[in-house]
Image (cartoon, helix red, strand yellow):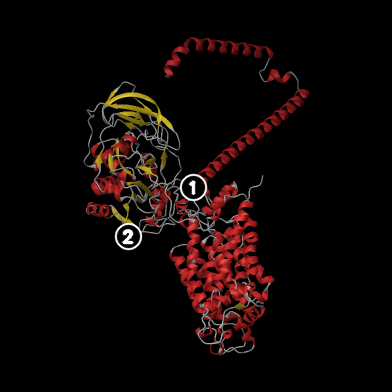
Amino acid sequence: MSVAITSSPMQHGQLETNRLMLLVIAACLPGVGIGTWFFGYGIIINITLAALAALVLEAMLLTLRKRELKFYLGDNSALVTAMLFGITMPPGSIWWMVLAGIAFAIVIGKHAYGGLGQNAFNPAMCGYLFLLLSFPLEMTSWHIPSDTLVEGASFSPLGWQGLQQSLLLSFPFLAADETTVQLTIDGLTMATPLIEFKMSAQNALLAAWETELPLFARSSGTGWELVNIGYLLGGLLLLYKRIISWHIPASIIGTITLLSLLMYAPGSTAIYGTTYLHLFGSATMICAFFIATDPVSAATSNLGRIVYGIIIGISIYAIRVWGSYLDSIAIAVLFGNFCAPLLDHYLRPRVYGRQKASLPGGKRRTG
Amino acid sequence: MSQQQHSIKIARKLRAHRIFGGIKPLALKARSLRSRIMPAPIPEILILPLLQHQGSPAAPIVNVGDQVLKYQLLAAAEGPPSVPVHAPTSGEITAITDSPIPGHGEQSGRCILLRADGEDNAIDLQPLPDHRALNHWQLLERVNSAGICGMGGAGFPTTEKLRASMERGIELLIINAVECEPHISADEALIRERAAAVVSGAEILQSICLANRCVIAIERDKHDAVKQLRDSLESSSVELLELPSKYPTGGEKQIIQAVTGLEVPHDALPMDIGVLVQNAGTAYAVHDAITEGKPCISRITTLTGAPLQTPKNFDALIGTPVSFLFALCGIEESLHTGSIMGGSLMGLDLVSTDVPLIKTSNCLIAKSRAEFPESKPEQACIRCGYCATACPARLLPQQLYAYSCNQDLEQLEQLNLADCIECGACDYVCPSHIPLVQNFRASKQTLAIRGQHSQTSAQWRRRFQFHQYRLKKEADAAQENKSAHRTAPEADYEEGGFSRDKARQEITAAVERVATRRRNRITSSGESDQERH
């Protein structure tokens, strides 16, 4: 009998970090599936490319940092970063942009800070913002396979031709001749409903946006609300599995709902959209359940999480409505990340048997 | 008078309150509850540590070679807080020596070794069927002489707790039958089979500490035990409160919160808010001590774990070697990888199974590789915050961990590390296998050492300052003297009744006195030494 002395507790729960990461990836799948159904293979190409690159980069950096490769690579955190980054990238983004973004995410956003657990900012959003600042036009237009290019009505973005087009968008060098690519790109550009809405609102096309702009209609190949419902379902799965707590999603969604209800003025020339448009017309759900809840860069106490969610919610709304950037999520989340250490420092829960939450920094002994 | 000191409000009808945090580990009690409590046979050698409780060890009053009878006092309590030790069976004292005892790492302590003669001859006991015949001081004395300490695991001398509570005045006595550790079923088995005795013990404890109310708190899902308790409580003023099963509801601070909704202030004791908590096993031991006059020589303990063929609860004598009890359950040595005394979440890892069962041992777990795999390598903390959600003290283990890695003692103090009860809930939920509690224990020790250091340094500083002050004072005095000399020499001496001759005489007399005293001491030293022994 060999005895290895351990100290209590000697029993442990089943949930492990690497499994937790896999569950997050699994919870993304409904949204990714629905997104693919509507927008074609672009998302999957993004994710696959990002994941492969993330694993290679992670392995390289771990080697450089002299860490045990198999153990640290096995925590699956790079895959989660790649997944979130791939989802937020516009489908049909050219391959080197995806690579540049994920490289920034893994190298600068994560390992430069000391790797998993030490990164102050959400790596996927770092990568995204890096691209958004460098390539604003490319990052705000979605290229999706479309039947406008194909003769005949039986076109499906999931079909062979759809795949072909998606691949061509990401890897233009695969094309036999230059003109196909040109044609493809020119014909397929579209933006998210909110962007479309923002632009058209300024043209006073407001009142009947739903009928005039066929953004929510299935026939046009856009399924924004269904995609968001997909991420909502995945998020609920994470909540049910207790991977994430309700505080951050609830406060983000609550803040956005409240603000959009207060500000909404139908018929006006202003640019405020409806609550429904804000919640389901853009990337709100994936932000609330998947991106803002990244524990490493978020606040950790429950009260801190609520305030963190409110900060992100306000930022999202403000940037969307009054800001000049079109994609608010990445900026809002990074802004929340900036605030997180401060929230952690000041919003501590009241400890059992103590009157007040301990305010740090009150009594500093000198000497 | 003292009743007014604490202004606590306890609802007339008790209800279960939520505790902070907590976890729901898979309960593994069923396998040891399949059979009834079995009396364990008497082993050949009993090992009786003199320190089985918190406090100072008892002092042996028997000598090697003495023949002793069952229930006979072997070691008397020495200086509070201490607890006496009695003979679990009749036999011969073979040694009073250092022997391995349960503790962190390889620990040994003074033990009385008793070779059982198999006769089990007992001294006459003084039963007392109705405890109301004695007043509470007399009852307390009986509890004191019976050698009872907290049977739930902490092992605080029961008398001390009761006496302090009597003096302070108590509103509510809570009998803790929660037993939230996933493997332990000793209290559940006890209540299932001997509920009446536990209730009687609760009543006795209530009449000793003069609590206005007494409640037995138990986890809701222990259906058989709850039913038995309810039946036994029909004609009693003792109340019953069922609590949801959640670890660590059975912790003292946590059960108080669960029953009353109150928190024990961090710098106070439960009795300061008018509450006293006693374990159900302790209540049973008190019942035995008062109504049957039996000192504490046995306890009910759970034997469980995958390597045991028949896990069960034993009524075993204190001092029985752990290996003896494992053998009674049919241990599969090939599966056996280690042993735990206590629960899997707060228990002690045993270095060897030669250690004895002591008064606080509520459970013995034989570990197997499948159930207790080797601890996995530590991954990065991803700040998931599960630990903070699980912490029953509402601490922030993840921040504590970061600061304890950096040895930032100031932050650790500000985050109230001292309030950690080491329940292990944070460790249990940590997805990155970080040994949080181990870290916190080490940091607590560092803090304690630093506290000592600052105390000693403060003491030295005070001494030095006093030294400086004294030197200054002496210098001042000398200065004054000098100036006094200059103004009035010689004459003053005479006036103050001081002359050189007189001084010389006094000096010789003193020298003489000392010399005589020294001579006397040398001649009488032999006697006085003996007296001292």
Q: Which residue is mark 1?
A: B437
Q: Residue at x 48, y 67 (%)?
A: A27
Q: Is residue A297 left or right of residue B499?
A: left
| Local SS, label 1 | helix
Q: Amino acid at mark 2?
A: Lys
Kindly tell me whether residue A347 is visible in this rendering. no
Which image quadrant for residue A88? bottom right
x, y (%) of residue B254? 41, 52
| Local SS, label 2 | loop
Q: Residue at x 34, y 30 (%)?
A: B47
Q: Is residue B400 left or right of residue B125?
A: right
x, y (%) of residue A24? 49, 64
Mark on residue B409?
Answer: none
Tag 2: Cα neighbours inside 10 Å, few (<14), some, or many (≥20)?
few
Q: Nearer the viewer, mark 2 or mark 1?
A: 1
Q: Which residue is mark 2?
A: B13
Q: Tell me the quarter of the image containing the N terminus of chain A.
A: top left
Q: Earlier in the sequence, mark 2 or mark 1?
A: 2
- Of residue A365 and residue B1, the one placed in the foreground of this image is A365
